[in-house]
Amino acid sequence: MKKLSRAFLAACLFTAIAAWAASPPPDRAGLGSNQAETVSLMQRAAHNPGNAGTLLEEALRKSPDFPPVYFRLAGYNLLKNPLSFYDWSYYFVEGFRAYGRSWWWWLDLSGLCSYCLLVSFVLALLVTVLIRLPKEFPLLKHDINEDRSLLFLPGVLLAAAFMGPVLFLGTALLLLGFYFSKKNRLLVYFVLILIAVLPYLENWVNTVYSSSNPELRAIVAVNEGSDNSLALDALSGRKDFESLFSRGLALEREGRLDEAIASYGAAMELRKDPRIFVNLGNCYVLEGNTDKARGLYENALEIRPGAPAYYNLSTLYRDSLDYTRGDELYARAANINPAGLSAFLKSDEQSGGKLLMDERLGVGDFMRVLEKGHERKLTSSGIPSGVSSLAAILLLVFFFIYNRRRRARAYRCSRCSKILCPICEREPKWGQMCKECYSSFVKLEVVDPKERVSRLLMIHGYQLKREALIRALGFAPPGIAHIYAGEVMLGMFLLWGFVFSLLLYRLNPYFTTGLSGMGHGWLGVLGASGAVFFYLVSFFSIRKGVGQRWL
């Protein structure tokens, strides 16, 4: 059991890291990404297996920050030579690293994992409460009948019902948790802590949902170099900095330089950003006004040194045959962002015959646009996030204090499941047994042999039925049998992990990223594998537990 628990905890740690450790990717201003051409190459590779490797390598060269092409190459090399571990594992690892270089892909993956984590937690909590309700509610009812001062407990549950379904479920688990074993009471603390931070996870999921607005898609598309037409249409007439900058970039690429200069000029009235100076300089270079362009690049460097300004300025000096100054400026550009400059040069991205490096919006700009379009579509409560979190923290403090102060509480006979409490049983029996079971197992001389045998047969029949039911529940979704048998914490985590994996598998096909129409194919495989893993761990754990009689 210890080995199974360790394996399960390791799996939970992995899924938690995958869902929570995703941090926004770094800004990659100035990098090219020809997604439309890349997708076309990948489609050709799918219909031309004989030449798939060459086509996929070409797609990778076109878009080095496009995760699907790495996973396609990993699959291609795996099928071609499964024993060549390095060849296919290298592309698989690089595919994950590419998420850190592509904002839209990171956003979609983070949103999908957060949504699955949120929904699976609520479902696992609901199932846990429903399974344990028939077990622990009679104990609570017994205590209230013995001590009327405890009538406030149902009032707490009623008040939580007006704060949303998740807080209601958390409060219900709290009331049931008073009767859990000491080990399983840790689950109540964990659930209440998670409910306290849940509103912020909901806020992030809602933020990701808002990313489908056409303005954000247009801004991301033009700045990631995948499409210009969206920006020309969707951003027309918008007056915010990000829209004006992005539309100016699209106009510049389409050769509509006068309109691009006007759009950049409007953006500059809102913010003196060095990126505008660089792109304006590019427009003037394309118009043939290199002197004005040189001045704009130098203005950008005075505000903040950047690789695009240094690189473009070096191009102007080289064109004027001043190679010494040009090489010096190029070295500075390479020193600031060597990987970015190398990727740009490999992309063959040209502007009107001139190899110029544009400045682009980065992660911080995308997030600001995303926040502006935020809508609260998913919510677990009708109260403000801060109030919901405070309520969960207060419940946690109450549970801690109540557990320390209240010693007398109802319990069940360990043999026949009869409800007992210290008030009814003034002399608690050894092993938490009722009077009849204690007499039948310990005080043999005070019980008639026939009554003792009848009692033992009744207990044996009860135990056999319980074991049969637990074995049958072992075929149910993971964790259900554990929750029923009293291993509540382990059972809920098994169920949570299973539902999370299943949701990843089922929802992944409906999440397509950016403008490519592609999703996270590897995530479906991971979700299916995770669901099978949790099921097998749960199934064999139940078999072992019933066989060794610790369940």
Image: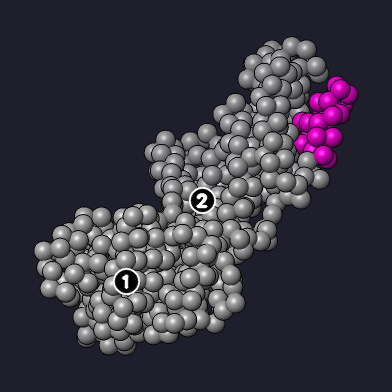
Residue 332 image position (x, y, % from top left): 21, 57
Q: Main secondary structure of the magenta part?
A: helix
Image quadrant in which you'd find residue 486:
top right
Q: Position of residue 283 (x, y in %)?
A: 36, 77
Q: Is residue 234 left or right of residue 352?
A: right
Image quarter of the N terminus = top left
Residue type pointed to by label 1: Ala
Number of residues whose C-alpha sits closer than 10 Å to that of mark 1, classed few (under 14), some (14–19) or many (20 or more) = many
The residue indicated by pointer 1 is 293
Residue 308 horizontal side relative to residue 398, left or right? left
User: Which residue is nearer to you in this view: 107 or 161?
Assistant: 107
Kind of residue indicated by mark 2: Gly
Instruction: Check if residue 158 falls in the magenta segment.
Output: yes
Q: Which residue is mark 2?
A: 497
Q: Kindly report which numbered mark, 1 or 2, lies closer to the viewer in this rendering.
A: 1
- Identify which residue, 345 or 55, lies in the foreground: 345
Image side of residue 292 versus residue 406, left or right: left
Question: Could you classify mark 2 by the number of other residues whose Cα lies within 10 Å: few (under 14), some (14-19), or many (20 or more)?
Answer: many
Dot 2 lies on which element?
Answer: helix
- Magenta range is 134-159
Disc 1, SS: helix
Image: 7 above or below 435:
below
Can residue 190 be seen here?
A: yes
